Image (cartoon, helix red, strand yellow):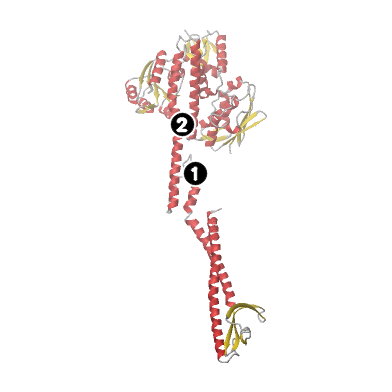
Amino acid sequence: MKLITKTILYYLLISLPLLVIALFLSYTLIRSEVRDGTDEGLWKEKEHAEKLISNGQNSCLNSNSLSGIAADSSGGKGYQFKDTTVFDKLEGEDINYRMLKSHYESKGKNYRIIVAKPTLEEDELLEGLYSSLLIILGFLLISFFSVNWILSKTLWKPFYKTINKLDNYDLKEHSLQNFENSGTTEFSRLSEALNKMTDKIYTDFVQQKEFTENASHEMQTPLAVMKAKIELLMQSPNLKEHDMDQLQGIDTSISKLASLNKALLLLAKIENNQFKDVSEVSLEQVVNKVLVNYEDLIQSKGITIHKEIKKDIKLKMNPGLCDILIINLIQNAIRHNQPGGKINIVLENAYFSISNTGAPLNIQPEELFVRFKKNEASKESLGLGLSIVKGITDTYGLSIRYDFENNVHTFTLSMN
Amino acid sequence: MKILLIEDEPELRKSIKEFLYQEGYVVESANDFAKASEKAGIYDYDCVLVDITLPKGNGLDIIRQLKKANSKAGIIIISAKNSVDDKIEGLDLGADDYLPKPFNLAELNARIKALFRRKNFDGNKAIVLNEISIIPEERKVTVKDQEVILTAKEYELLLYFVSNKNRVLSKNSIAEHLWGDDADQIDGHDFIYTHIKNLRKKLLEKGCADYLQTVYGIGYNFKVN
C-alpha cells in the first residue's frame, strides 16, 4: 500500500470517531441550550397564564391546541416538563411538542395550566448538524488527499528519486555518484547514509577485485623462480630415478599452480573489465581455429566432430575473450567426452551450441559455473573453465544454458 | 653472443644467468632501472631480456632508450603482468617477443634462438645438426638431404628439441611449448608421447641417428654429441 493511501486511511480512522463524538457533543449541547430556551419561554407563558388567572381572565391563552387552562380537581401540585407528539392533520405528520404542565391555586380554586410549543427547531437543528458535519468530513477528505498529494509530489520527491537511483544501482559501474541532498533533514540523512554505504561497498568491491589480481601477479615471480630452479636441477647428471620422480611431481604441481594462477588472473581481469577493445569477431573462424589447434587431442580420443555452421555470424566482443570462450567450451566438450564419443557444434543466427557425449554429472547443473566446482571424475580439471565462460558471457550480456539429455551434455550460448 | 638480463628478483636472475651460461652466452645483468639504463647505454648487446616492472622505473622505457639509440639488440620482454596492453605496447615499441612469467627456461632458450635466427646474426638460414638440417623459413626438415614430412606439431617439437639439445626437457615444458596457454587443459601427457613416437619414427626412417632419449620420470633429452 502506498504511503499516501496509508496516511489518508489513518487520518480517516482517527477523524471518523472524532467527528461522531463532535456530532454527539454539539447535538447534546445545542439541544440542551435550545431546550432551556424553550423551557424558559414556556415558564414565562405559564407565569403569564397565572397572572391572567389571578386577574380572572382565563379564557384566552396561546393559540395552539395543546395549551389551555382548565379547572383541576385532582389536587396535584408542582409542575412538569414533558415531550409529546401530536399528529398534525394539515401537515399530515407527527409534530414534536414541548409542554409544561403546572397546577395553580388562585382564590381557592385549583387550575391546571398547560403551555406547549412545537419543537420543530430541534429536529432541524439535528439535521443541520448532520449535514454540516458531513460537509466538514467531505472537506477533510478532499484536503487530506490534496495535501498528501502535494506533499508526496514535493516533500517526498527526493525520497522517490533516491529509490529510483537505488533501483538502477549497478555495483560494477558504481553508476550513482551521489544521492541528492534535499532540504529535508531526514532525507538528507538518508542520502548521506546511502552515499557512505555505497561508497564503502564500492571501495571494498574494488579492493577485493584488485586483491585477486594483485595476489595472482605477485605469485607469478616466485612460481617463475621455482620453475627455473627445477629445470636447472633436472639437468644434473647425478639424479637417481627416485629423485627424478620427485622432481617430476614438483614440476607438475608448479605447472598446475601456474595454470590455476593464470586462470584466476584471467577471471579477475574479465571481472575488472580489462578487455576493452571490441570488434566484430567471426565465430566460424574462431571455432575452426580452435578445432585445428585441438585436432590431435580430438584424434587421440577418437572423437568425431559434427558441425552445422552458418557462415558470417559475427559477435561484437573482445577477440581475445571470444577465443577464450570458444576454447573453454570446446575443451570442456573434449575433456568430458568418452573415448570414441561425439561432439556436435551448431552455429545459428541466434545461438551457438556445443554438445558432447559423456557420463552424467555428479554435481548439480547450477553448480557447473561456480568456481572450483567440478565433476569428481575430472581430476585434471581446474574447475575454472566454465566460470571463465560465465564471466565472459556476463560481460557481454549473453546467456549460457546447460542441458543434459540421453547422455548428451549441451551448452547453448544465446546471442540475442 | 652477449645478453643483458634485466630482472629484479635475485633468485630468478641467478637461475636465468646460470642457464644462459650453460648455453654458452655471455650474460650481464642489472637489477634496477638505473643500472639497466646505464648498461644499455654503454655496451652493445645481441639480446636484451627485460622485465617490465622494475624498481625505480619501467622496463618499457629501456626499450624506448634502446630504440632511440638505434640498437640492433633483439628484445624479449619477460613480465609477470601478462597484460595484453603491456604486450601490445612493448611490441609496438619494437620488442621482438613477449614471455609471460612463469616460463620454462627451455622456452626462453627457444625464443632467444628463434630471435637470433630471425635477426640472422649467423648469416645462416638453416639450422644444421649433424645429419639433420632445418630451414625455418620454409618449415622444411631434411635428414641426409631427404625431406622429412612432419606435421605442424612434430615440426615444432623437433625445433624445440634442437634448440634445447643436450638438455632434459620435462613433459610439462614440452606440452607448454606445443599448446601454449592451453597446455594445462591437456589431460595427461600421453599424446605428447604419441607425437614424440611419430617424430622419432619419421627421423629414423630417413636414416637419422636416434638422438631422442627418454629420461625416466621426467621427459626427454635430445642428445647430440
Rate crowding at label 2 as few (under 14), some (14 to 19) or many (20 or more) other CA atoms within 10 Å.
some
The tag on residue A278 is none
Quadrant hosting residue A20? bottom right
Quadrant hosting residue A304? top right
Amino acid found under the numbered disc labelled 2: Thr
Question: The residue tagged with tag 2: helix, strand or loop?
Answer: helix
Residue that carries the numbered disc 2 in the rendered image? A212
Q: Is residue A137 visible?
A: no
Question: Could you say which is closer to the camera, residue A410 or residue A54?
Answer: A54
Amino acid found under the numbered disc labelled 1: Tyr
Question: Could you say which is closer to the camera, residue A164 or residue B114?
Answer: A164
Rate crowding at label 1 as few (under 14), some (14 to 19) or many (20 or more) other CA atoms within 10 Å.
some
Residue B210 placement (x, y as % from top left): 53, 8
The tag on residue A169 is 1
Question: The residue tagged with tag 1: helix, strand or loop?
Answer: loop
Q: Is residue A365 visible?
A: yes
State yes or no: discs 2 and 1 in contact (Cβ < 8 Å).
no
Most extreme residue toward the bottom is A56
Q: Is residue A86 above or below residue A156?
A: below
